[in-house]
Amino acid sequence: MKLYKLSALLVLSLAADQFLIAQDRQFVRTYQSNTLAKGSRDLEAWSTFRTGRQYYYNALDTRLEFEVGLTDKLQTALYFNTSNSAFGANKDTLGGIADTSISGIFTSSEVSISSEWKWNLMNASTDPFGFALYAEFGISANKFEIENKLIFDKRTDKNIFALNFVNEYAMVNDIKNGTTEMFTEDEPEIDLAYMHMLKPNIGLGLELRNSNEIEDGNWNFSALYGGPTFFYAADKYFIILNVLPQWTNLRKTEDAPNNLVLNAREKLEVRLLLGFSF
């Protein structure tokens, strides 16, 4: 009987590993420390719908990502990003109020490319906790961004915990009174996630996100989000869905004086990620 149980556990473990090596994530926002095996490749398509400001606002962001494992501890990726938004006229003060003197819906589009690097230093399953360093470099027509992450996680048989400390630094060009000016933005963020694996290839969890903005040295707001994440993996593809409503504004300022940040952030975000391994 003991030999039977041991064999069954071994088969389940191998089956779980087959799903794990197909991708390096079970969450859409919170990153994990594991990397793709050397030579493994993923193609991921992201779609994020954002809606709900103090004026009419809807946005759809897309990312197409190609990931490859350079070694068993180092992976890299290339992203092609687009962002499209539709919004009503607004005054970006007092929390972003609608400008009722102007009619119509305006649109905005942005295209950018990004390069990602992730280096795994500790294993989430065999070490006390997993740890990885992450850097992403992005460029668009008027912006250069550097995003850094400290990634911590822990995995047991049926549970995954993950914590990210994130900072996104951007240098942005703008036009003021006919003169080109550059300003900087810092967007520190903390991401926290938990998932329970119902089966080796199916998981249900919760992701929390604390998003902050520091512009020219001023800390403008601290928005707290939280919502469920669903994960499903098959042999060669995986799907992750997250619904993330904004809960509260932890730092009220003149720029964001209300209980929710609805000038620079949205009331609701929904993200769907579809990945293929080959």
Image (tube, grey):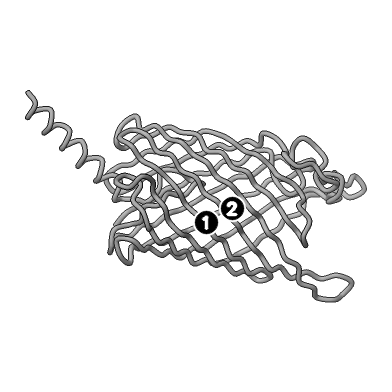
Going by the picture, which residue comes out furthest to the front?
Answer: 128
Residue lying at 77% horizontally and 50% vertically, measured from the top left: 220
Q: Residue at x 57, y 54 (%)?
A: 166
Q: Is residue 88 above or below residue 146?
A: above
**Residue 219 location (% of width, % of height):** 76, 52
Q: Nearer the viewer, residue 177 or 223?
A: 223
Q: Secondary structure at mark 2?
A: strand
Question: Which residue is farthest right?
Answer: 101
Please name whichever residue, 40 or 148, is drawn nearer the observer in this view of the structure.
148
Q: Quadrant of residue 41?
A: bottom left
Number of callouts: 2
Residue 160 in the image: state x and y as whole percent: 40, 38
Kindly identify which residue carries mark 2: 61
Is 197 or 167 nearer to us in this picture? 167
Residue at the top extreme of this rendering: 1
x, y percent for residue 204: 42, 32
Quarter of the image containing the C terminus?
A: bottom left
Would residue 115 appear left or right of 202 to someone viewing this image? Answer: right
Three-letter amino acid code of the residue under disc 1: Lys
Quarter of the N terminus within the rendering: top left
State the residue at coordinates (33%, 62%): 69
Quarter of the view holding residue 249: top right
Q: For mark 1, what is the residue?
A: 149
Please give left or right for residue 210 compared with residue 31 in the image.
right
